[in-house]
Amino acid sequence: MLFEDVRAVYLEKMDALLKEGHVVAVVRAWGYFVALLGSYLFKSNLLNTLLKIPEKTFTHSTPAVRTVSFVSWTYPTVTF
């Protein structure tokens, strides 16, 4: 159930916020969400779905966005 909620609601809203230009806020929120879910990400295979958000921001033209993306991307490695 959580997986479908995340796919249907969370990812769509995050994509919409990215398109509106709230890139840093979206990536930070993504990192907090991933840290909150912790090891559940690995048990549910939810991480693969969630990785679509930082994938879109790693090649952003602004260095600050790339930095925040990298820092947030490290959160799943810490929970592993």
Image (tube, rainbow, N blue to C red):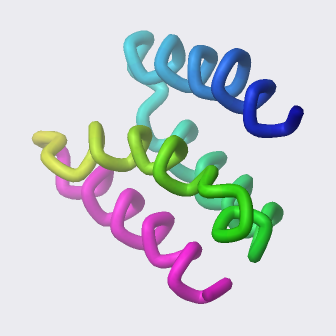
Residue at the spot x=53%, y=45% of the render? 50
Q: Quadrant where the C terminus lies?
A: bottom right
Residue at the spot x=48%, y=20% of the render? 15
Is residue 38 highlighted in magenta?
no
Q: Is residue 35 above or below residue 17?
A: below
Position in image of residue 40 (x %, y %):
78, 66
Is residue 64 highlighted in magenta?
yes
Residue at the spot x=65%, y=69% of the render? 42
User: Quadrant location of residue 75?
Assistant: bottom right
Q: Quadrant where the N terminus lies?
A: top right
Position in image of residue 20 (x %, y %):
43, 11
28 vs 65, left or right, is right
Residue at the spot x=69%, y=27% of the render? 10
1 vs 25, left or right, is right
User: Quadrant location of residue 23?
Assistant: top left
Question: Magenta region: which residues?
Answer: 62-80
Position in image of residue 3 (x %, y %):
75, 37
